[in-house]
Image: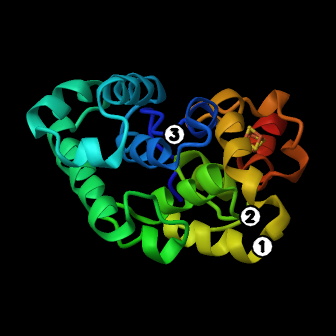
Amino acid sequence: MVYGSTDRRATALAQLQAAEEGDPFRILIGTILSHRTRDENTTRATENLFSKYKTPEELAKADPIAVSRLIRPAGFYRMKAKNIIRVSKQLVSEFGGEVPESEEELLTLHSVGRKTANCVLVYAFNKPAIPVDTHVHRISNRLGLVKTKTPEETEAGLVKTVPRRYWLELNDLFVRFGQTTCKPIGPKCSSCTIAPSCEYYKAVVAPRTKDS
Ligand code: SF4
């Protein structure tokens, strides 16, 4: 089981949703920028970028060095600059400058994997999907909803076990819960209201409490 690392690689989806509501392009690009970085760095990089380039057409024509300077806070900025320019070119040439609304089409975009595609479906288009980031993966395993090693396996397991009516809210709920209570290191199990239903609590925390 992978419990996630301390770098809090969450996608800051709730923040993105609030800031970029109604703009699928910003949500798509913001999610790509969020890979392997902290929430606050993603926000800074996205704001910098969109202060200069607001549309796929503008970003498709941008100079990679200028873009990489703007998104530097997000880390891996040279690679990410290339990726988002390439995605923008694809949007212009293949999708009329619009972000596509289907998972199949989103997955054809350069550097877009299942997590990013599902984020766009949920947060840009309000379509049920389960984006699995480090919080969703860790918490689902701790609770015992799944027993998996990779986010892809977690998504496949959750899709089978979680009723579709909860999919839209699951990512946001777990990200918040993971940032405040079920943290990667030092989860606050003693004050967690769902501890009685949690497999990790029953298997690891409760026996320790009995012994002490
Ligand atoms: S009991 Fe602990 S491990 Fe289980 S969900 Fe709560 S905080 Fe997470």
The answer to which image quadrant residue 94 occupies is: bottom left
Q: Label 3 sits on what residue type? A: Ala
Q: Is residue 197 above or below residue 112?
A: above
Using the numbered discs, state the Cα–Cα distance from disc 3 to disc 2 in whole angstroms: 20 Å
Tell me the residue at 72%/31% (across/down): 181
- Mark number, residue 161: 1
Q: Label 1 sits on what residue type? A: Thr
Tell me the residue at 37%/64% (across/down): 96
* Label whose residue precedes the other's in the sequence (1 or 2): 2
- Mark number, residue 9: none
Which residue lies under the disc numbered 3? Answer: 10
* Visible residue check, residue 132: no
Q: Are marks 1 and 3 in contact (CB under 8 Å)?
A: no
Q: Label 2 sits on what residue type? A: Leu
Query: In this image, 108 relative to 105: left or right?
Result: left
Residue 207 percent across, percent down from the top left: 78, 45
Query: In this image, 209 relative to 56: left or right?
Result: right
Could you tell me which secondary element the residue under label 3 belongs to? loop
Residue 52 percent across, percent down from the top left: 29, 26
Colour mode?
rainbow
Residue 212 percent across, percent down from the top left: 78, 30
Using the numbered discs, state the Cα–Cα distance from disc 1 to disc 3 in whole angstroms: 23 Å
- Mark number, residue 145: 2
Asked if ligand 1 lies within 8 A of label 1, the reply is no
Q: Residues within 10 Å of mark 2 (few under 14, many from 20)?
A: some
Question: Who is closer to the viewer here, 74 or 101?
Answer: 101
* Label whose residue precedes the other's in the sequence (3 or 2): 3
Q: Are marks 1 and 2 in contact (CB under 8 Å)?
A: yes
Q: Residues within 10 Å of mark 3 (few under 14, many from 20)?
A: many
